[in-house]
Image (cartoon, rainbow, N blue to C red):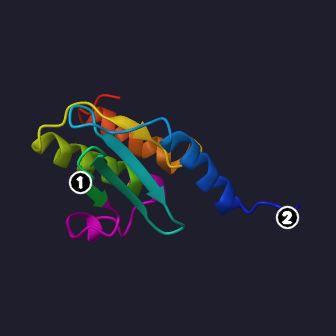
Amino acid sequence: MAKETRTQGRIRRHERVRRKVHGTADRPRLNVFRSLAHIYAQVINDVDGSTIAAASTLDPALRESLSSLTKIDEAKEVGKLVAQRAKEKGVESVVFVRGGYQYHGRVKALADASRESGLNF
């Protein structure tokens, strides 16, 4: 039996959670994807299959101000921005899906910043 890679393990964990967790119009899903260089967050309504709000470290609104920050501070800024955009669309409460990553480091920083900016989960 071949050994599972780190990425395959993350995808397996993410799929296991996604079988149980779905975003609705009342309570959409806040999804996180983390690469080595960037972090991405989306607020998704799974019933319609539509993205309500999104933010990432590649976002033009953040790109210039992130150059001197650490990756954890960048994740906090992304969390604040996605929460602000979701609240503008009328979303107050979300279901947080960490994408198979540990709730630690950048993922935790993004979640905490989203909570501080007014999203409930």
Give the residue at x 38% y 59%.
40
Magenta residues?
56-73
- Mark on residue 50? 1
Quarter occupied by residue 117? top left
Badge number at residue 16: none
Q: Residues within 10 Å of mark 1 (few under 14, many from 20)?
A: few
Image quadrant of residue 24?
A: top left
Q: Check disc 2 and give the amino acid type.
A: Ala
For the point 24% across and 43% down, which residue is it? 83
Q: Nearer the viewer, residue 12 or 5?
A: 12
Task: Work out whether 84 lies above or below 57.
Answer: above
Is there any visible trace of residue 101 in the rendered image? no
Residue, x 26% and y 56% (percent of image)? 54
* Above or below, 66 relative to 14: below
Give the image quarter of residue 6.
bottom right
Picture coordinates of residue 33 (x, y %)? 46, 57
